[in-house]
Amino acid sequence: MARACFYKFFEEYLQFVKNPQLEIIKLSKLTNDLTSDILVRCCGFHKVESARYKTITTSCVNYEVVFEEYIKKGWTIQFIPPIIINKEKGYIEEYPKEFLTIRKILSFNGK
């Protein structure tokens, strides 16, 4: 599954990104450990951190719901913004912070 998600991301990358060579440099700067961070930030995977006790790193924007049981059991959820392909503009970018802020406000008002 990881391999399929990885290939799907880069298939869309090559299809929609206007300057793939420039954008790959940007991608490498946005991801620390290239393979695992790409799986988390570009493919929607989560990783359990071995260096940090009871920590899960994710780019899932509704992590509070997805990991609700883990949070109740004392786990720390480290959120990093997803990296998306902006198909209209032809480049990669972090998920817009405005959308994340709006989502937090809406979820706060909903409780």
Image (cartoon, rainbow, N blue to C red):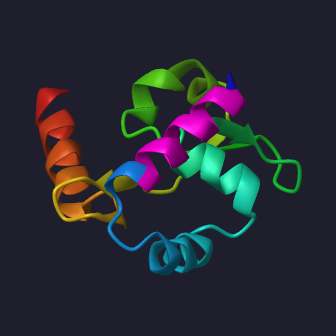
- Magenta-span inclusion, residue 23: no
* Quadrant location, the C terminus: top left
From the top left corner, tell me how far across and down residue 107 is, in percent.
Answer: 20, 35
Above-or-below relation of 73 to 61: above
Above-or-below relation of 53 to 60: below
* Residue 74 placement: quadrant: top right
Please tell me which residue is depicted at 26% across the width and 62% down the height of the picture: 97
* Residue 35 placement: quadrant: bottom right
Span of residues in magenta: 2-14
Please tell me which residue is depicted at 18% across the width and 52% down the height of the picture: 99
In this view of the protein, which residue sits in the foreground, 42 or 48? 42
Q: Decide if residue 92 is on the left or right side of residue 32.
A: left
Please tell me which residue is depicted at 32% across the width and 68% down the height of the picture: 18
* Residue 34 placement: quadrant: bottom right
From the top left corner, tell me how far across and down residue 9 is, in percent.
Answer: 50, 43
- Our reading of the magenta stretch's main secondary structure is helix
Residue 103 seen by the camera: yes
